[in-house]
Amino acid sequence: MDGMRLRAKISRSVRPSTIVEPATTTRTRSPVEWRKVWRLAGIGALIGGALSALLVALWWAVPLGVAGVWPGVVLGVQVGVPVGAMTGAVLAPIAGLLLLRDVPLWLALLSPAVGTVIGGSFGLLDSLWFALDVMGPDPFRGALGGFLIGVIAARLGASRTRRIVSK
């Protein structure tokens, strides 16, 4: 047999499914995933800043009534936007990459945002009317708790939806 026929016979006998990759390969993070992280951080900063400004404005306006609306808006922009944007820029990529990877985008954005507003509102009402001591619940801790509950609800809701669709 000449060399060409021998190589052809060997190449036909080795199928791609029998080739084994080495077990020591390491997966590196591709640039596409880093772009996702930066996008999630930007979206989290926008949503976090807007929701935090709203909650700080309400925190100021609710006890003072109509006279507290404008100072509440100013305080919301000066304090709420930076705090909410920084918090959202940090928490959104962490939650998105760890827990919300398989969740539809609308659910991954809506559920934590609604949880943040509800949790922040409960913290606001608790700090205004029940006046616990210094370590009591406040809007920031309430918003963080609501965000976490929203992320967990989105994750469970997405897995439940997948199970219903697959049946």
Image (cartoon, rainbow, N blue to C red):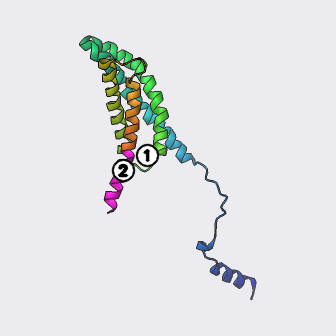
Q: Residue 119, position in %: x, y?
A: 34, 31
Lateral position of residue 36 relative to residue 149, left or right: right
In the image, 22 versus 105, the foreground residue is 22
The C terminus is located in which quarter?
bottom left
Circle 1: residue type: Leu
Q: Answer with the quarter of the image where residue 143 lies.
A: top left
Q: Residue 99, position in %: x, y?
A: 45, 45
Cα distance, mark 1 to mark 2?
9 Å
- Give the prevailing secondary structure in the magenta stretch: helix
Q: Earlier in the sequence, mark 1 or mark 2?
A: 1
Residue 63 in view here:
yes
Residue at the far left in the pictured view: 66
Residue 105 in view here:
no
- Which residue is located at x 61 percent, y 73 percent? 18
Circle 2: residue type: Ala
**Mark 1 near mark 2, Cβ–Cβ under 8 Å?**
yes
Question: The residue tagged with tag 2: helix, strand or loop?
Answer: helix
- Which residue is located at x 43 percent, y 34 percent? 44
Give the residues in magenta. Answer: 154-167
Q: Which residue is mark 2?
A: 158
Q: Answer with the quarter of the image where residue 72 lies.
A: top left
Q: Residues within 10 Å of mark 1 (few under 14, many from 20)?
A: many
Image disc number at residue 100: 1
Please tell me whether residue 160 is drawn above or below residue 141 in the rendered image: below
In the image, 148 versus 106, the foreground residue is 148
| Residue 79 inside the magenta-drawn segment | no
- Which residue is located at x 49 percent, y 39 percent? 94
Residue at the far top in the pictured view: 67
Q: Residue 84, position in %: x, y?
A: 43, 27
Q: Residue 69, position in %: x, y?
A: 29, 15
Q: Residues within 10 Å of mark 2 (few under 14, many from 20)?
A: some
